[in-house]
Amino acid sequence: MSNSKRDTLSRFLSYVLRHKPDAIGLSLDGQGWISVEILLEKLAAHNHATTFAALAHVVKNNEKQRFAFNADRTMIRASQGHSVGIDLGYSPRIPPKVLFHGTVARFLSDIQRLGLTKQRRHHVHLSLDRKTAAKVGARRGTPVILEIAAAKMHADGIEFFCSENDVWLTDRVPPCYIVFP
Ligand code: HQG
């Protein structure tokens, strides 16, 4: 399979496993899992036929490790980033002292007023390092990196989760925990 075909498959998987499972008649379970067999059937029926080997390649090599199999590789899900109503079932975790969020200048006045809010996703997404946050922000323009006082938030009783692919998740970041550049 060519790189561009793998890229197309990976993008389509993000679409159906995070946002629009019903676009190909999938129904995710409460934690976002779907049977690999059913996924392959539905992909084939909707003009995205692929093989288990190609799917496994995407899971293993996706640059952000967006997808995960269960232990016996009969089920698959996206590890974070959903807009559909599922609960990934991650347990609360103690965050590092500081986390980072990459955004762009046009959102800053709203963020200063309201803090970081989750928009269409289930959580606010935070990165472990500046470099990753810069890439997240760069999806929308010149990145602006915000520093988040995560340990302080946690000490104040705010819960954090960490996805299987090391994205830190929280419900909201009030402005008082954000260091603006
Ligand atoms: C901004 C990608 C106005 C926020 C990435 C961001 C990440 C506000 C946008 C993952 C706001 C939401 C998540 C407020 C936040 N007012 N704007 N109060 N609070 N924003 O895509 O963090 O490729 O939902 O700064 O790599 O950009 O999908 O979140 O710009 O890990 O795997 O509203 O998505 O990963 O955008 O990105 P998003 P995000 P994947």
Image (cartoon, rainbow, N blue to C red):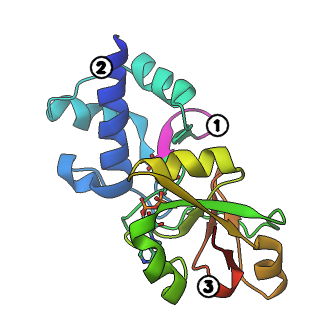
Q: Earlier in the sequence, mark 1 or mark 2?
A: 2
Reply above or below: 108 against 52: below
Are discs 3 and 2 less than 8 Å apart at CB?
no
Q: Residue at x 50, y 89 (%)?
A: 113
Asked if residue 96 lies left or right of residue 35, the reply is right
- Dot label at residue 5: 2
Q: Is residue 71 magenta?
A: yes
Q: Earlier in the sequence, mark 3 or mark 1?
A: 1
Image quadrant occupied by the C terminus: bottom right
Q: Residue at x 85, y 83 (%)?
A: 155
Residue 30 visible? The answer is: yes
Q: Nearer the viewer, residue 144 or 154?
A: 144
Q: SS class of the residue under badge 3?
A: helix
Q: Name the residue at 45% across, 80% down.
A: 109
Which corner quadrant of the image does residue 84 belong to? bottom left
Amino acid marked by disc 3: Pro
**CB at mark 2 closer than 8 A to ligand 1?**
no
**Which residue is label 1 attached to?**
71
Identify the element where label 1 is drawn. loop
Of residues 145 and 169, the one drawn nearer to the viewer in this rendering: 145
Disc 3 from disc 2: Cα separation: 42 Å
Which residue does the numbered mark 3 point to in the structure image? 175
- Residue 36 falls inside the magenta stretch: no
